[in-house]
Every structure is written in structure tokens, then in C-alpha cells.
Image (tube, rainbow, N blue to C red):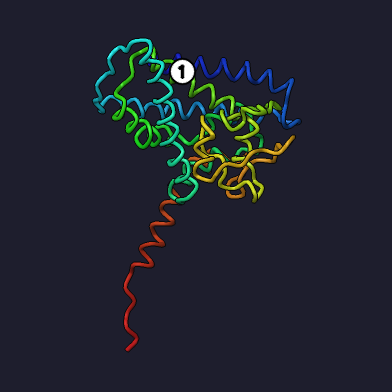
Amino acid sequence: MEGESQFLAWVVGAYLVVGLLELVLPAERGQGMRGRGRNLLYFAILISLGLGTLSLWLTVTSIGSAAHLPVFDRVIYLPAYLFTMDFLYYWYHRAQHRFPALWAVHELHHSDGELNVTTSYRTYWLEAPLQSILVGTPVLLLFGRPAAEIGLAAAITARFFLLFAHSNLRLPLGPLTPVFVGPQLHRIHHSILPEHQDKNFAQLFPVIDVVFGTYRAPQSGEYPPTGTPGLASDASLMQTQLRPFSTWLDRGLRMLGRARPTRSTR
């Protein structure tokens, strides 16, 4: 509970600071407060259900702690840890866009038509345990549970880029665009334009997209509209929370229908 309280305070503080910057340097003007308030509600659900489930998973998953490393080893360990995490996240993220069962969970995040810092945690609550199991656990198995100071540095770095990448800031990174994920680059990923589909999946290091052919550099001054045609940005809370389960049920029934043997007409 103490860890969740610190996480909540950190994110809310970042929302306030970045939100003020978004008023000064907005990439998209005219965004209202209603959408941000709705995103805060989804964040509250994520905190109560998603992180609660995640805490249970971390409790039953016994992975040893990493030894306290010398300074030089810590310098190597941290970027290697972050790059491996982003590499696995890249493939998990691509799978979310490729397979309907995973897209049903990820769709809520993409449905925001007013991309801003609060979109970062506009996620379905199952996203937290799924990402921890499919991305976080393999990283821990490879590297061990990091020492406290390294784990803190990794968490701060990952959260910074998550919030920064989703911010509604007109802040192009210039020559650093293919080095670190920024708001202009990640907005391409959230774009509704057909030429932007399935691009820029990495959360930290765009070089992963470059290597696997999914990188698209933003053009000068390019800040496209965002959202998804499948789920409205202002969809009701009940609709968004039930949608994954209704999608899975519908697909399951259709698969059973296709698998049912047909009777001979003779």
C-alpha cells in the first residue's frame, strides 16, 4: 500500500507539472478538462484493480534479489536492463496490435482522441498484470530483482518516458528523435491516419523500431489526430470495462460455431 501511495503521488504530480507545460506548448489546441477527468477515472481503476492484481503476482513470484553492484557494473546494468525491457515490450506491444484478444485490452488506451499526459495511464486494468507477466517477469528472470537504487532508477526512467511520450507538447527532439521516444514520435503511433498504422511500438528506444522496420520518423510539424474507430473516446465506463470480455465471448462463440461438425444432407 505504501508503494502504491508513492506511485499515485508521483504520477499525479507529474500530471500537474506536464499539464501546465501542455497549456504553454500544446501540440493540439482546444483540449478540454472532461477527457482528462475521464482518464483520471481509468487511472483510479488501474490503481485499485490492476496494481492490486500485480502486487499479488509479485508476491507469489519468487525471484532473488540482485547483488549490490560496483559503480561500473551499475552503469552497465541499468541501460542493459532498460533496453531488454523495451525489447520485450516492443514485441508484446506489436502482439497487442496484431491479435484481437490482446487488442481488446489495449484498445482503451488508443481510443483517446485528445492525446495528452493523462493518456499515459488511460489503460484497461488487466494491462498491468499482463505486462508484468509477459514483459516484467522475463526481465527479472534474466537480470534478477535489481537492487533498490537500480530498481528506483529504472522505474523513474520508464515512467518519465511513458508520461513524456504521451504528452500534448509541441517539442520535437530533432536529431535525438531516433534515439529516445518523444511526444511527436509516439503521436505517430496513436495516429488514426492509415500511413501511420503499426509504426513506432518501442516505449524507450526507437532503434528497436528501426531494426525491425516499424520506425516512421515524424515530418516537420506533423502532429496527426489520434483515436480509434472501434471505441469512442467518450465511451461509457460500463462499455469500456465490459468490452474486452464481450469481445472474447463473441470470438469464442464464433470459434465454437466454426468447429461444430455439420450434418450430412444425405
Q: Judge by depth and name the residue closer to the eye, 152 or 255.
A: 152
Label 1 packing within 10 angstroms: few (<14), some (14-19), many (20+): some
Residue 140 point in image, percent of width and height: 32, 27
Quick check: 118 left or right of 32? left
What x and y, as percent, mark residue 175? 65, 28
* Amino acid type, label 1: Phe
Residue placed at 56% from the left, 40% from the top?
Answer: 200
In this rendered view, identify the residue nearer to me: 46 or 200.
200
Can residue 238 be seen in this snapshot? no
- Residue under pointer 1: 7
At x 50%, y 26%, the residue is 44
Q: Quadrant of residue 188?
A: top right
* Residue 179 x, y percent position in the rendering: 56, 29
Residue 212 as seen in the image, left or right of residue 37: left
- Tell me how many marks there are: 1
For image coordinates 31% across by 73% down, the residue present is 261
